[in-house]
């Protein structure tokens, strides 16, 4: 018996040593609600638009791609609020006017989107109020957290956990309990902080908050006072988060990223956290010290954000701003957007170019020929049902490796246009020989410089898409299909580019590239900019997240890079 106890004790010591010597791997946790028409994902009051996804085209005779159009506004699903939601513009000279009335979603600095999650447990308040009324989170609840853990500080993300979304976000009609039943005074409201609680948190210099209920404002009368109490200090926050119980009270990295709409007082987004290992501490430190680079251009109807096509009628849905409700005090319109799911910075999931199964596809004769060429060169084209909401967040976040391919610009003869310079396996191997081999799960970012050079408003917008597609100028550097397969062999799951797309302007070669990506269970992130400002010698970490839309074959989102300081970088490297 003593021998047995000794063996058990020895095993426990070994396990304890290994747990210390080899810290747990980092884990991504999704805090975003699923966006789908049958869920209560939009604010239900008139005239807020109801979310719609329209499958404009699908893999078949008319298209080799699955193409979606979205009708979406910023109050959809898990979402971001910024100061102009309640702070009026300075030139209006109103009581609530100030410079922060111009801090729209496209102007918030990227470091403010993330930080250390500080989860304040207010589950004891859930449903503890009359119908139509919200239980109030008070400063005492924040002080209770501080007594148990530590004092809040700049760089924290305060998250109010009531488990409200976890319990009540359900398909309709059961999902009416999420918002509708409260507004109709059939059920208690969701727990939320009162204005005094917001003022107290402001004394701690906290700039980012979140709640797992439908809004950061108690019903029926304190929603706007609470909003203004926090937003006037420059705070931003997440509304309609979920799964906050899956992260510790402190120590996790939390982030909310969403499409960069011009002049948005709020916006749809994707919230997630990272726990375990050393990565959370590293990213928290970057946000706390404002070491961040924004990689997404601003979305505006004045800019060329979607593929205009070559043949008449082949264009994708143009990005349109839709005003639906005028806010007199703020002198602004609440607005949503009608947009292609690949407008601006976006995700390319495997299902974008692949059929859902291995049944024969009735392609057009031209596409059947291209498929025969592809399968002769690269093997059988695959199938996939992996739409945007199924792509793991860990696939689109990782150590950033920037491959400058601008040396290819100007390498195609004008007589061959429309054509794109091709990024080959040999080019990637030369990059590895100079800068070190690519490692599994790194994010390879192709720096073409194309969007930086040509992102211009109308009428000077043709150089980005139209001129290359019509053969009036050279196309942007594009990734060849065999290069995709090589990257898969290195363990790369995600390739990003600061060009309009990864495939280039030749439709056959582009389709081969997308077939190679999808068939190898890889994803793309397209339409970045500002890649040249990534400090490649300071351990840059790439973060991208697409809005969690069910059955979407694209995915609008936001990309940023967080990086270390030079001292820590030199010690690590």
Image: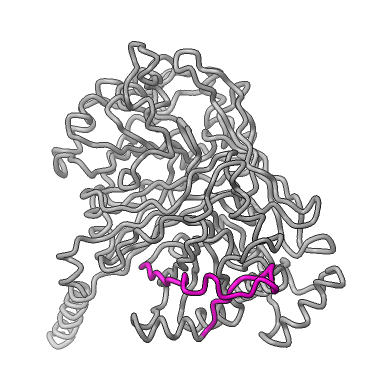
- The answer to whether residue 446 is left or right of residue 19 is right
Residue at 77% across, 54% down: 314
Instruction: Say which quadrant the N terminus sits in.
Output: bottom left
- The answer to whether residue 397 is left or right of residue 455 is left
Residue 536 x/y as whole percent: 31, 67
Residue at 56% across, 75% down: 411
Residue 132 x/y as whole percent: 47, 18
Query: Up-down: is 261 above or below 65?
Result: above
Colour scheme of the rendered structure: one colour
Image quadrant assignment for residue 376: bottom right
In front of the other: 263 or 129:
263
Residue at 55% across, 50% down: 344
Image quadrant assignment for residue 229: top left
> How many numbered discs, if any?
0
Q: Is residue 231 magenta?
A: no
Query: Up-down: is 60 above or below 9?
Result: above
Residue 495 x/y as whole percent: 50, 68
Instruction: Say which quadrant the C terminus sits in.
Output: bottom left
Query: Up-down: is 55 above or below 510?
Result: above
In front of the other: 348 or 511:
511
Q: Is residue 410 magenta?
A: yes
Q: Which residues are magenta?
A: 399-425
Image quadrant assignment for residue 374: bottom right
Query: Up-down: is 302 above or below 372?
Result: above
Residue 186 x/y as whole percent: 54, 20
In front of the other: 17 or 510:
510
- The answer to whether residue 527 is left or right of residue 147 is right
In front of the other: 468 or 45:
468
């Amino acid at each position: 018996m003593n021998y047995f106890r000794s063996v058990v004790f020895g095993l426990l010591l070994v396990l304890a040593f290994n747990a210390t010597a080899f810290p747990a791997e980092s884990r991504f946790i999704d805090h975003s609600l699923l966006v789908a028409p049958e869920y209560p994902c939009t604010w239900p009051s008139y005239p807020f638009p109801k979310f719609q996804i329209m499958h404009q085209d699908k893999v078949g005779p008319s298209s080799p791609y699955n193409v979606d159009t979205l009708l979406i506004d910023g109050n959809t699903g898990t979402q971001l609020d910024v100061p102009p939601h309640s702070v009026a513009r300075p030139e209006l000279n109103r009581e609530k006017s100030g410079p922060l009335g111009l801090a729209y979603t496209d102007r918030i600095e990227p470091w403010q989107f993330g930080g250390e999650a500080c989860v304040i447990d207010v589950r004891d308040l859930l449903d503890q109020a009359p119908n139509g009324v919200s239980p109030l989170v008070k400063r005492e609840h924040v002080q209770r957290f501080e007594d148990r853990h530590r004092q809040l500080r700049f760089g924290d993300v305060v998250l109010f956990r009531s488990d409200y979304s976890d319990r009540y976000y359900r398909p309709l009609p059961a999902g009416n309990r999420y918002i509708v039943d409260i507004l109709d005074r059939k059920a208690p409201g969701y727990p939320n902080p009162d204005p005094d609680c917001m003022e107290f948190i402001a004394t701690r210099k906290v700039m980012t908050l979140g709640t797992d209920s439908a809004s950061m404002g108690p019903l029926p009368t304190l929603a706007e006072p609470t909003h203004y109490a926090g937003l006037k200090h420059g705070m931003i926050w997440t509304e309609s988060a979920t799964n906050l119980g899956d992260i510790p009270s402190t120590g996790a990295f939390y982030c909310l990223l969403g499409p960069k709409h011009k002049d948005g007082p709020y916006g749809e987004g994707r919230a997630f956290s990272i726990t375990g290992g050393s990565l959370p501490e590293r990213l928290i430190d970057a946000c706390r010290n404002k070491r961040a680079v924004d990689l997404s251009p601003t979305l505006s109807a004045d800019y060329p954000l979607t593929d205009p096509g070559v043949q008449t009628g082949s264009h994708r849905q143009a990005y349109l701003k839709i005003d639906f409700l005028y806010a007199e005090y703020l002198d602004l319109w609440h607005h949503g957007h009608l947009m292609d799911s690949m407008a601006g910075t976006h995700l390319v999931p495997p299902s974008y170019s692949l059929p859902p199964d291995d049944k024969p596809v009735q392609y057009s004769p031209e596409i059947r020929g291209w498929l025969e060429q592809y399968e002769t060169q690269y093997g059988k084209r695959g199938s996939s049902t992996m739409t945007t909401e199924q792509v793991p967040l860990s696939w689109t976040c990782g150590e950033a490796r920037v491959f400058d391919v601008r040396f290819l610009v100007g390498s195609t003869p004008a007589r061959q246009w429309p054509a794109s310079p091709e990024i080959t396996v040999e080019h990637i191997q030369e990059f590895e020989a100079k800068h070190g081999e690519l490692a599994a799960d790194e994010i390879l970012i192709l720096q073409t410089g194309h969007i930086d050079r040509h992102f211009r408003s109308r009428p000077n917008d043709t150089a980005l898409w139209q001129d290359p597609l019509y053969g009036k100028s050279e196309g942007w550097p594009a990734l060849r299909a065999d290069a995709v397969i090589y990257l898969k062999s290195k363990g790369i799951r995600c390739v990003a580019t600061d060009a309009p797309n990864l495939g280039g302007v030749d439709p056959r070669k582009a389709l081969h590239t997308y077939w190679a990506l999808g068939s190898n269970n890889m994803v793309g992130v397209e339409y970045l900019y500002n890649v040249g400002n990534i400090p490649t010698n300071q351990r840059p970490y790439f973060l991208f997240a697409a809005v969690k839309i069910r059955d979407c074959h694209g995915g609008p989102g936001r990309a940023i890079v967080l990086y270390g300081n030079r001292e820590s970088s030199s010690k690590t490297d």
